[in-house]
Amino acid sequence: MADPPGVLVVDDDSTIRSVIAELLLVEGYLVRTAVNGRDALEVLRAWRPCVIVLDLMMPVMDGWAFRAAQRALPGALREIPVIILSATRDVERHAAELGAATAISKPFDLDQVVTTVAAIAGRP
């Protein structure tokens, strides 16, 4: 039996990170979290998720810097699809500039997060 699809949730807001992670766990996904882009890169050294849910505005390493670093990674790691989840203005434009699969604006609907993750990563 195959492992469930993996999702990496990267957000500096602990409430948002926890709510999304718990929701996706209940849906059957394997979930790991990171508080910023630097921590997310560390997670990617040991684990390859099917999709990354990424905030843009974070301390230490923001979403823009993370995407630049991710795109420089070897092999399949650079190809992991990214869902931008951000309160920035013009989130869709930023997502397109970053080569993200799609974008969700904060505040967000939890069902939209699950539906979007399922569309990209598949259902567990």
Image (tube, rainbow, N blue to C red):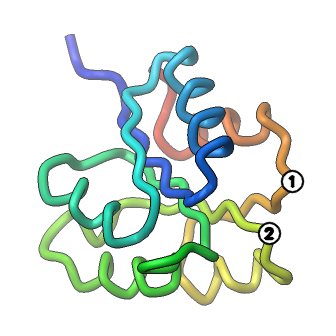
Which quarter shows the N terminus? top left
Does residue 3 appear left or right of residue 108 in this picture? left
Residue at 56% over, 73% down = 58
Circles 1 and 2 in contact, beta carbons < 8 Å: yes
Mark 1 secondary-structure assignment = loop
Mark 2 secondary-structure assignment = loop
Q: Position of residue 23 (x, y in %)?
A: 62, 25
Amino acid on which disc 1 is placed: Pro
Q: Position of residue 108 (x, y in %)?
A: 83, 48
Residue where numbered disc 2 is placed: 87
Q: Position of residue 55 (x, y in %)?
A: 60, 65
Residue at 50% over, 62% down = 82
How far apart are the alpha carbons under marks 1 and 2?
7 Å
Q: Quadrant of residue 6?
A: top left
Front residue (pair 44, 102):
44
Does residue 110 appear left or right of residue 79 in this picture? right
Task: Pick whichever of labels 1 and 2 is earlier in the sequence.
Answer: 2
Q: Position of residue 61 (x, y in %)?
A: 43, 80
Return the mark for residue 34.
none
Which quarter shows the C terminus? top left
Q: Is residue 6 above or below residue 57?
A: above
Residues packed near mark 2 inside 10 Å, few (<14), some (14 to 19) or many (20 plus): some
Amino acid on which disc 2 is placed: Ala
Residue where numbered disc 1 is placed: 107
Does residue 103 appear left or right of residue 42 in this picture? right
Front residue (pair 39, 120):
39
Residue at 81% over, 62% down = 105
Q: Is residue 54 above or below residue 20?
A: below
Residue at 40% over, 33% down = 31
Q: Quadrant of residue 7?
A: top left
Residues packed near mark 1 inside 10 Å, few (<14), some (14 to 19) or many (20 plus): few
